[in-house]
Amino acid sequence: MKVLHIITGLAAGGAERQLLLTLRHLPLGYQSEVATLTNPGTVADALRAEGVPVHDLAMRGNRDLTVLPRLTRLIRRGQYDIVHTHLYRAGLYGRLAARLAGVRTVLATEHSLHAGTIEGRPVGVGVKSLYLAAERLGGSTVAVSGQVAATLAAWGVPSQRVHLVPNGIEAARYALPTASRAALRQTVRAALGVPAEAWVLGAVGRLVPGKRFSVLVEVLAALPAERDARLLLVGDGPERTVLERQAARLGVADRLICTGERDDVRDLMTAMDVLAAPSVEETFGLAVLEGLAAGLPVCHSACPALDELPADAAPGAVKVPSDAASYLTALSALGNRRSTALPQPPAVAHYDIARTAAELAVLYQRLGRGAKTPVRIGPRES
């Protein structure tokens, strides 16, 4: 079965990294290619290194309609059995191009949809109407969490068109032997210029206002000097300059480390002592799951992936209100540093990428045969 994935860009964001992991773990029998409308970043490089063809459509902006005939021609030439889109702009152009090219099985994964925002942008009447019009051009929409499925239902998307297939993580890759983890921790810290005995608060994600990383800069400034704390932000985005200015204003610029866009998140997590995720709006909470897989204690403000599991599925995770005082209290309760990894909790096994990729393959088969029964992923043994 030949599948073309169409995505808005291939920088190292959550949806982009999730696509990489999914293609890495799809069962045999699927020939995957990727078309990116714009910004072929580090994830494009990683896909190509693994032998996945990546087509750069070189779209110049949201209203660059010239991308539509180029994308339609690509789909016709490729003779794909399935076209699978990811993210808002790719969903608009990709589903229309697939229909124009005559592809029968067209679906989209909804990675970042909330009642009033999509991918961090406010949703007005025009955006919502356009989204729903594009959704009807496809055959199905994949929701990465129950929260996303509920939002789609509230927007009026028929339930029979929605399939719940959660995101996944490479659980085994994060489970490093103690000696290997300690050596990698030392190497990564040295490369970042972090003292071996410093206490490192980490966070992973796009540097945008919705992630609320400014809360963690406030925490860094409030921590006692004897803690010798650092804040390690893994990711890039338009908020980076704002956060650096905030750190300078609070006198902690020398203790804020912004790595920029990276594709070695697992390695960077070994340098952390705790992971924090102060965002109040998440559709899944991938960074939280990655932190737990890496053996870190995690403080978070929103994680639908955990909310949909039993309370004892993630004993290393603590839910915290998204303000500096609450995070300071929670982080202080964890103690000064933790050099050894916590065991992976049941939540990590529940969301193992090998299992979720297999579930996506089942969906492909059902849709390819014309089945209309939604795929619902219920509780699974961990």
Image (tube, rainbow, N blue to C red):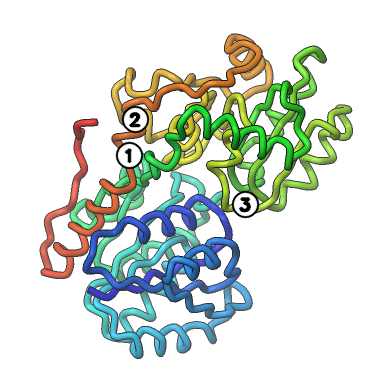
Question: Where is residue 30 shown, x and y percent of the image?
Answer: 26, 69
Given residues 382 and 92, the one toward you in this image is 382
**Residue 106 left/right relative to 222:** left
Q: Which residue shows up at 35% across the image and 73% down it?
A: 4
- Looking at marks 3 and 2 on the same chain, the residue that comes earlier in the sequence is marked by 3
Image disc number at residue 347: 2
Q: CA distance from mark 3 to mark 2?
A: 25 Å
The quadrant holding residue 130 is bottom left
Q: Which residue shows up at 50% across the image and 50% down it?
A: 14
Question: Where is residue 33 shown, x and y percent of the image?
Answer: 38, 73
Q: Nearer the viewer, mark 1 or mark 3?
A: 3
- From this view, report whether residue 152 is shown above or below residue 137: above
**Residue 146 left/right relative to 230:** left
Under circle 3, the secondary element is loop
Q: Which residue is mark 1?
A: 351
- Looking at marks 1 and 3 on the same chain, the residue that comes earlier in the sequence is marked by 3
Q: Which residue shows up at 68% across the image and 21% down it?
A: 324
Q: Which residue is mark 3?
A: 262
Q: Amino acid at mark 3?
A: Arg
Q: Amino acid at mark 2?
A: Ala
Under circle 2, the secondary element is helix
- From this view, report whether residue 95 is shown above or below residue 17: below
Q: CA distance from mark 2 to mark 1?
A: 6 Å
